[in-house]
Image (cartoon, rainbow, N blue to C red):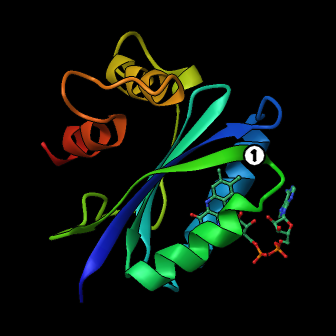
Amino acid sequence: MSINQLVYISQAVRKMSAEDLHAILHTAKSNNQHIDVTGSLFYNGGWFMQVLEGPLETLNALYKKIEKDPRHKNSRILYNEPAKFRTFTRWSMNMTNLENRQADKYDQLVEVIDAATTDRKIGAASPAVTLLKMFRE
Ligand code: FAD
């Protein structure tokens, strides 16, 4: 079955606690596994960036639901394109809290979110494409 990858960015309405993030991840994991969606969610203390992978219609319906969630606002799709294969095959959803990052391990990810929030490219690529490439390689 053909799949799409959808990447969006959104602004958290308040600083998310570990419990807040855990609740989002718990719901995402249990729902996504029933609808054949995989992906990853990143939080940098102010913004979310999420990759969702799955059948196009499923993703569009899921995104419509997620964007209405009152825990975030100003949601904006950065990328929604067909993909030959999934990048995040292991996770119905995974969460990376970049506030807790160790040393410089996640600096590239922080840059991806910074670039997306300021409409900047990274080299010649859009932040979403850079993000997907980082995990593919
Ligand atoms: P219900 O749980 O009945 O929700 C009813 C309404 O209340 C919805 O509008 C819901 O958004 C809102 N709501 C639920 N819990 C809270 C809360 N603790 N505080 C405030 N409002 C709340 N869901 C997925 O299935 N897959 C994902 O990948 C996914 N990613 C997400 C990423 C982010 C950044 C956020 C903020 C949410 C994400 N969610 C995801 C959750 C999604 O937005 C819905 O809350 C969830 O799918 C359940 O919605 P529902 O309408 O089926 O059920």
Image location of residue 4, percent across then percent down = 32, 71
Up-down relation of residue 64 to residue 129 (above or below): below
Q: Nearer the viewer, residue 124 or 26?
A: 124
Residue placed at 73% from the left, 37% from the top?
Answer: 12
Judge left or right: residue 72 versus residue 93.
right
Residue 63 position in % (x across, y down): 59, 67
Kindly identify which residue carries mark 1. Answer: 72
The image quadrant that residue 108 belongs to is top left
Q: Residues within 10 Å of mark 1 (few under 14, many from 20)?
A: some
Which residue does the image show at 29% across and 77% down from the upper left? 3
Indicate the quadrant containing the N terminus: top left, top right, bottom left or bottom right: bottom left
Relative to 113, say whether 76 is above or below: below
In the image, taking residue 128 as reference, residue 119 lies left or right, namely right
Q: Is 23 left, or right, of 36 in this rendering?
A: right
The reply to whether residue 84 is visible in this rendering is yes
Asked if residue 82 is positioned above or below residue 117 in the image, the reply reads below
Nearer to me, 37 or 20: 37
Quarter of the image for residue 115 reads top left
Could you say which is closer to the camera, residue 126 or residue 40? 126
Farthest residue toward the top? 103
Count of numbered circles on the image: 1
Does residue 27 appear in the picture of this structure? no
Disc 1 residue type (three-letter): His
- Ligand 1 resides in the quarter of the picture at bottom right
Query: Can you tell me whether the CB of the residue at mark 1 lies under 8 Å from the nearest atom of ligand 1?
Result: yes
Does dot 1 land on a helix, a strand or a loop? strand
